[in-house]
Image: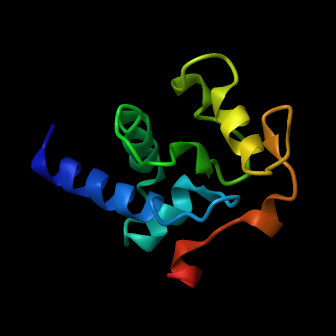
Amino acid sequence: MKAESLNFFNQVYEVAKLIPYGRVTSYGAIANYLGASRSARMVGYAMNASHNMEHIPAHRVVNRKGLLTGKHHFEGTNLMQQLLESEGIKVIENQIQDFEAIFWNPSKEL
């Protein structure tokens, strides 16, 4: 992997670590915060690559509509949903409920 990609991934991880318990953000919101508004997919790649790393709450990063699009990258069939629900986040049919209320925007909150 290129050094630029690794640096971007590390920046993504630093932002992801700041997502508060019981809140979620989107791939695009992280990309926007990092000044790379067209790189939401790269944020997704970073989240997928983080599963063997400790303290990266990848389960708190979802798509812009609150869908658990990354859930197939977690072990088991429902681990992402279970992790979110353990934080009090309600999920129905892969959709976060009250998404706007629990959405964490790093551009506004950091």
Quadrant in the rendering for residue 82: top right
Where is residue 38 shown, x and y percent of the image?
Answer: 43, 59
Which residue is found at the position 62% from the left and 30% from the top? 71
Does 36 sit left or right of 23 as displayed? left
- For the N terminus, the quadrant is top left
Give the vertical position of 32 relative to 53 (above or below). Answer: below
Nearest the camera: 57 or 61?
A: 57
Give the vertical position of 103 relative to 62 (above or below). Answer: below
Nearest the camera: 19 or 46?
A: 19
Where is residue 5 shown, x and y percent of the image?
Answer: 22, 48
Q: How many marks?
A: 0
Which residue is found at the position 41% from the left and 55% from the top? 39
Give the vertical position of 59 relative to 81 (above or below). Answer: below
Where is residue 7 shown, x and y percent of the image?
Answer: 20, 56
User: Which residue is situated farthest in the left direction here?
Assistant: 3
Where is residue 18 shown, x and y percent of the image?
Answer: 48, 66
Give the vertical position of 22 relative to 33 (above or below). Answer: above
Coloring applied to the structure: rainbow
